[in-house]
Image (cartoon, rainbow, N blue to C red):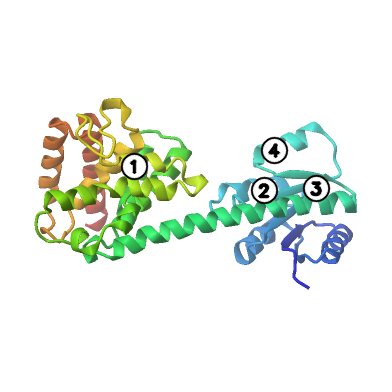
Amino acid sequence: MRKAGKVLVVDDYEPSLRGLGQLLEHAHYIVLTATNGRDALEIVKRERPDLVLLDVLMPGLSGVDVCAELKRNADTRLTPVVLISGEQDRQTRLAGLDAGADDFLNKPADPEELHTRVRSLMRIKRLTDDLESAESLFLTLGRIIEARDPCTEGHCERLAEYATTLGKHLNLDQADLDALYRGAFLHDVGKIAIPDRVLLKKGRLTRKEYELMKRHSAIGDDLCRTVQSFEAVRPIVRHHHERVDGRGYPDELAGDRIPLLAQIVSIVDVFDALTTDRPYRKALPTATAYRMMRDDARGGWCQEDLVAVFIDLHRSRELERARVAV
C-alpha cells in the first residue's frame, strides 16, 4: 500500500513515542523517531520528513527550541511542526507560536484528532512542495537561459550576491531580500523567446532586432504570472530595463514609479554586464565600469545615489577581499 507520508515523532518518554508511532503507522505513514532535540535536528536534515511531531518538554533542547531552529533554517522552515504537551498553560502555547509552530496537540493525544490534524498539515505540505517544484523549475530555467551564452556563466549567482548584499545594506526586510535573490535568477527569463541569432549576435542589433530583444521583460513577466509565489518577483522581471527619465521599457515608467527592487537588479545587472566578457566586447576594468555607471545615472538611467551606494559597497568589499588574499 502507498505510504501517506513521512512523519518524525520526537519524545523522550518511550511509551508516548511508541504509542504515537503505532497510531501513525496504522494510518500508513512512514514513522521516524527521536528521543531528544539534537537527534531530531539531525534526522530532519538527513531524512527530510513531511511533518514533525515534537514533545514540548525534553531534556536539553526543548520542543520549542527545536521548532524555532527548524523554522529559522531556510531548508526546513516550510516543514509543518506540531507541538505536543501535557501542559495547558497559555505561556507554552505563546512560546510555541513565537517559535513558528503550525499546530498543537494535548497529551494524551486523541487518535481521531491526531489523524485529522496530521492529514490537514500533510495536504498543506503537498501544496507547498508543488509550489517549490514550480519555483525550482523556473530558477533552473534562468540558469538554462544563462547557459545559452558562454559569456554569461555565473551571471545569476553574481547578481544574486550583488543584489542581496545591496539590499541588506539598505536595510530591506527578508521578503524583499528573497525577491531580490529570485529576481536575480529570473530577470531575463523572457529571453527564452529570443532567438540565438539576436541574443548572441556579436555586432550591433538592428532596430528590428532591438525591438524584438526588448520584448523579453514583458514575456518574462507573463511567464512568472503562472507561479503565484513569484508575485513579488514580477516587478523586477518586468521593470529592470526602465529608466528614471522615462525612456526605458516596456512601460516607460519614470522616477519613483520604478520599483526599488527593479532598480537594484538593474544596477547590478549593468555592472556585471560591463565587467564580464560579452559577445560584442571584452570585459571592462572595474574603475571604467564605475565611471560609466555614474555617467549613465547622471544621464537619466537610474537614481544617482543608489548607484553611488552600490559602488561604495562594491569597492569596500573588493578591498576587503584584497586584504584577505594578502
Residue at image location 22% in from the left, 53% down from the top: 322
Residue 26 image point, x, y percent: 86, 65
Dot placed on the residue nearer the N-terminal end, 2 or 4: 2
Dot placed on the residue nearer the N-terminal end, 4 or 1: 4
Dot placed on the residue nearer the N-terminal end, 1 or 2: 2
* Few, some or many residues within 10 Å of mark 3 (<14, 14–19, 20+): many
Q: Is residue 27 left or right of residue 177?
A: right
Residue 12 image point, x, y percent: 80, 57
**Where does label 1 land, which residue?**
238
Instruction: Give the CA distance from mark 2 to mark 3.
Output: 12 Å
Residue 267 vs residue 315, the one in the foreground: 267
Front disc: 1 or 2: 1
* Helix, strand or loop at mark 3: strand
Residue at image location 85% in from the left, 59% down from the top: 20
**Where does label 2 land, which residue?**
67
Residue 67 image point, x, y percent: 67, 48
